[in-house]
Image (cartoon, rainbow, N blue to C red):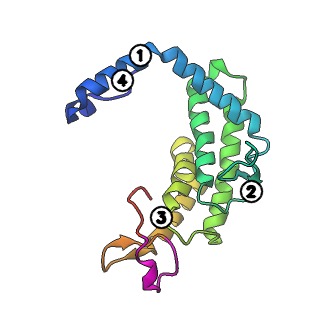
Amino acid sequence: MKLFTRTAQDAGCCNFLQHFTELSENNTDKINNGLKNSVTQILNILPEFTDKFPKAYSEGNFYSAMENVDWTTGFWTGEIWLAYEYVTTHESEFETGTAEKLKNAGLTQVRFFLYRIVNKIEVDHHDMGFLYSPSCVAAYKLTGSEDGKEAAIKAADRLLTRYHPVGEFLQAWGPMDQPENYRLIAPPIN
């Protein structure tokens, strides 16, 4: 399993990358077993978290279900898409219909994200990338989901409303017309 391209090696990290690649090649079975275990865990909790999302924190080592109103909900949907992508490349190792089950759950969640952005529910902040990249952008890239594409474009447009041309920054939170909120500047990942 090659994790890095020649271009990355040319960037000056040859020794680390070569060592990491060798370790990865020697542990392919362990990596695949870990990924299969992750998919199994996702499938086990999918019934509870298809129409809902896990809270950002656990209570008593359990993540309770909530609506799509937090800045972290995109990560769960992203996990579903990562599991889907893995299953589609290893279908013989899973029950028939596993990929379709994950795809349907992911697309269900994309509809919640589209609803959220169309109705402007908890979207006046800088975390649009965390919400819409692992969920809707991934859905569009993996399945061609038009809902995913529409939601992601609307989210990007919404994020642009946080831009301050004077100073060239994205305001992280707070009303846009209050200078005391300007100190909250979003990092580029968003």
At numbered mark 4, what does the secondary structure look like: helix, strand or loop?
Answer: helix
Q: Earlier in the sequence, mark 2 or mark 3?
A: 2
Is 159 placed left or right of 146 in the picture?
Answer: left
Q: Earlier in the sequence, mark 2 or mark 1?
A: 1
> Where residue 25 is drawn, which disc sits there?
1
Residue ranking furthest to the right: 47
At numbered mark 2, what does the secondary structure look like: helix, strand or loop?
Answer: strand
Three-letter amino acid code at the position of disc 1:
Glu
At numbered mark 1, what does the secondary structure look like: helix, strand or loop?
Answer: helix
Q: Earlier in the sequence, mark 3 or mark 1?
A: 1
Is 186 placed left or right of 34 in the picture?
Answer: left
The residue that mark 2 highlights is 66
The residue that mark 3 highlights is 156
Q: Nearer the viewer, residue 133 or 16?
A: 16
Whole-angstrom CA distance, mark 2 to mark 3, is 24 Å
List x then y, in percent, for residue 187. Answer: 40, 61
Range of magenta residues: 173-184
List x then y, in percent, for residue 145. Answer: 58, 50
At numbered mark 3, what does the secondary structure look like: helix, strand or loop?
Answer: helix
Q: Is residue 182 above or below residue 57?
A: below
